Each structure stands twice: as structure tokens, then as C-alpha cells.
Amino acid sequence: MMIEPGITQLDKCVDSRYTLVSMAAKRARMVGTEQKAEKEEMDIKDLKDLYFDKPVTVAVQEIASGKVGYVRSEALKLAERYEQEKYAAIHNYVEQETGAIEEPEPDENGITYGETIVEHEFDD
């Protein structure tokens, strides 16, 4: 049973528990391979005094300390790009139809909230 680091601490390091499990498993496999290589390089006499933490424990501690991180896959980047292109296309269409668009003002942090709503009448 693993007690430290706790799941609440680990949740802060990732966006979902699925990501946490995936990261921990991948890193634990790497740590296990590294430990195996170290054991093979040592003499039998030295192995008696050598102690390794379990690979999963090492992996989870590295995630909690920020030594190990993750980068989203290309699919997420493509989805974000698609959303930006869709927004730009809608923005351009509305601008052509209405003549101009009033952009919402950003707050003190440079973040823009809200959307501009334009009414458009369609011919039947």
C-alpha cells in the first residue's frame, strides 16, 4: 500500500488520473530497466548491500516532485488548431455579413471573456 505521496498531491501534477497511471507506468518501466542495467554492471558482492526502491515508487515520487512531466499528443494539438480555425472562419463570416465586430475588452490579465452575439435574419 502506497501512502506517500498521496493521491491528492499527485492529482495536482496531472489533468486526470488516467494520465497519472499512464505516466507512472511508463516511467516505472524505464526505472526498472535502469535498475536492471545497474545490477548487471555490479559484482555479486556489491549486490548484497545494494537496495533499490520499487520502480513504481520511484516513478510516483518523481511525478510528485515535478521531475517527470507529460506533453499532450499531436491529436490534441490538431483539435486545438481546428477550434482556432473554426473560430476564425465564424469571425470572418460575421465580419463580412455585419461589416464589423465589436471585440470584447480583455481584463487586467489580458484574458477576454464573453462572446459577441450578432442577430441575423434569414430569408425564407
Image: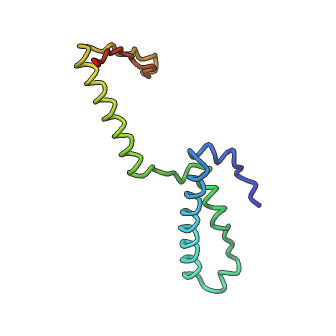
Give the percent coordinates (x, y) of residue 27: 55, 62
Q: Residue at x 51, y 51 (%)?
A: 69
Q: Residue at x 31, y 15 (%)?
A: 121
Dividing the picture into quadrants, the one containing residue 46 is bottom right
- Residue drawn at 34 percent across, 40 percent down: 81
Q: Is 85 situated above or below 17?
A: above
Q: Is residue 113 left or right of residue 26?
A: left
Left or right of 92 in this view: 13: right
In the rendered image, residue 22, in percent from the top left (x then y), is placed at: 56, 58
Q: Quadrant of residue 13?
A: top right
Q: Nearer the viewer, residue 50 or 108?
A: 108
Total numbered circles: 0
Residue 17: where, in percent of width, then height?
61, 50
In this rendered view, identify the residue nearer to me: 116 or 107. Answer: 116
Give x and y (percent) for residue 115: 41, 20
Q: Is residue 38 left or right of residue 89?
A: right
Extreme-bottom residue of the structure: 44
Quarter of the rendering occupied by the N terminus: bottom right
Q: In which quadrant will I find the C terminus?
A: top left
Please give the name of the residue rendered at 28% of the width and 30% of the height, measured from the top-left corner. Answer: 89
Above or below residue 18? Residue 42 is below
Q: Does residue 47 appear left or right of residue 92 in this picture?
A: right
Front-most of residues 117 and 111: 117
